[in-house]
Amino acid sequence: MDAGREALPDDVEALKAALLTARAEVAVARAKASDDQAMIAHLKLEIAKLNRQRFGPHAERTARLLDQMELQLEDLEASATSDEIAAEMAAAQTTAVAAFTRQRPARKPFPEHLPRERIIVPGPSACLCCGGSRLAKLGEDVTETLEAVPRQWKVIQHVREKFTCRDCEKISQAPAPFHVIPRGWAGPSLLAMIAFEKFGQHQPLNRQAERYAREGVPLSLSTLADQVGAVCAVMQPIFERIEAHVFAAERLHGDDTTVPVLAKGKTDTGRCWTYVRDDRPCAGPAPPAAVFYYSRNRRGEHPQGHLARWAGVLQADAYGGYDALYAAGRTCGQIFQAPCWAHGRRKFFELADIAEAARCKSRGKTAVVSPIAVEAVRRIDALFDIERTINGCPAAERLVVRQTLSAPRVAELETWMREQRAKLSRHDPVAKALDYMLTRWPAFTRFLDDGRVCLTNNAAERALRGIALGRKAWLFCGSDRGGERAAVMYSLIVTCKLNDVDPQAWLADVLARIAEYPAQQIDDLLPWNWRPVSPSKDIAA
């Protein structure tokens, strides 16, 4: 201890300098540690994503775990940047410690379609070296900074001048421009923003009204609700064309989810149904699309009514309401069942989840891992591995690969499952998982004879994901009519996303044109036919 004290300088300024150096070293060390933690989290996330792509989802909760890892990475990245800035500030106060700079990946250039504003910094009028005035421009260095302009509100005035004729004393005036809705006061871009915020970004109208009021534009809740109703009515022809396109398919994905509906003193549980046409996995030429419907309950009469005039292959879960559709002798044609292998696998996985069993054991609960379920998951995953190699290939190629590689594995799986089922009691949970597939085995094996059929019903589940997210924000539908309007808007928005189209930009353009658009050319406005107007690339400052 005495030797350490003797090593300290007696000069106050020297002590201050030593303290600043120590603080800078600590700040740099903290910045390095934060950067290492962020890098580790980033690499873990990348490894998890690559494993998911290569081996498929090892757990049904894998998607949630990836979301949690992304949130953790976000927090660590923010902390690392904060510590880096603190280290730079501490190192700037001393010359004994070098500043720490994080290694960041190369940033992609800004999109070319964004307008550029040139701010020219005046050059020197004299040479900085000798003071001479004979300067010639050699070139320029451009540093680009991405900036966002706050939302601007404006009132557009359409002025129609009146003229009187000196000969006949009649008054002439240009006709009034078309409005999106009769006697409308809101422009198409504003209507598109209100509708997309409500149904695409899950922002209820009361929150939108509060935000608009803070921006100096007070709009009441009832006023915004009027606009939403008008948009749904105006877009009804587009919805009908998407509906016709979906039900012209020979194969559909179908699914449903719960939608709370406001009732007297409580909320009822309604349903939102979706039917998705997506032929991209089998290289089909038809554009993808989705149509949604709303119902107050989950009775089988609803899907039976939706598909009353349709025939083909329906990929859906084992909901009993679909059973009447699979009956032979339908007047409109046969509907063939194609169940989801992911649903069948999930029942086994719940009994083979080793990680969940370990968590239950740590909490003092009993959890048993079934070796039969583990083996079933392994065998089903082998089929998914084959499917990933042919995703996006034509139906004929998919069929050849399935007949060559998948068919023998499916036959072995059936034999093995029936052998295991004979050993189990009917009350065994594994027996119930086996019965779920074995009782529908001809339908589960339909993909072996039809290259168009997908192994899962994930297309429909992805279409319903927005509703599942929105339930946490808007809590419930106000009425049955509100559920029906939501179904129309979800059909439009999800179809746009399936075709890689910005839903809000599409809505704004279609609302601006649909009032005067020829009815026989309405298909030009469908998301897969729509072409946005490319903005100007350069704006002179």
Image: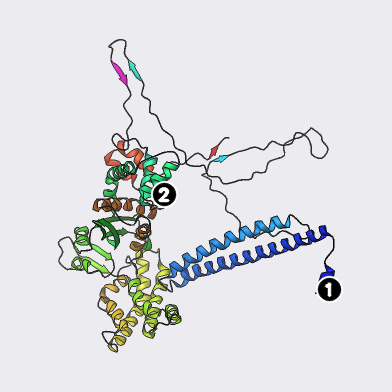
Q: Amino acid at mark 2?
A: Asp
**Which dot, 2 or 1, sits closer to the camera?**
1
For marks 2 and 1, the one nearer the N-term is 1
Q: Nearer the viewer, residue 210 or 488?
A: 210
Q: Which residue does the image show at 31% across and 59% down from the upper left?
A: 276
The answer to whether mark 2 and mark 1 are in CB contact below 8 A is no
Image quarter where the C terminus lies is top right
Residue 282 figure quarter:
bottom left
Q: Dot 2, how many residues are within 10 Å of its Cα: few (below 14), some (14-19), or many (20+)? A: few
Residue 176 covered by magenta stretch: yes
Identify whether 136 is placed above or below 287: above
Residue 17 figure quarter:
bottom right
Q: Which residues are magenta?
A: 165-184
What residue is shown with label 1?
3
Q: Amino acid at mark 1?
A: Ala
Residue 309: horizontal and vertical position, in percent?
19, 58
Q: Is residue 206 left or right of residue 329?
A: right
Q: Is residue 409 left or right of residue 144?
A: left
For the image, the number of numbered tags is 2
What residue is shown with label 2?
502
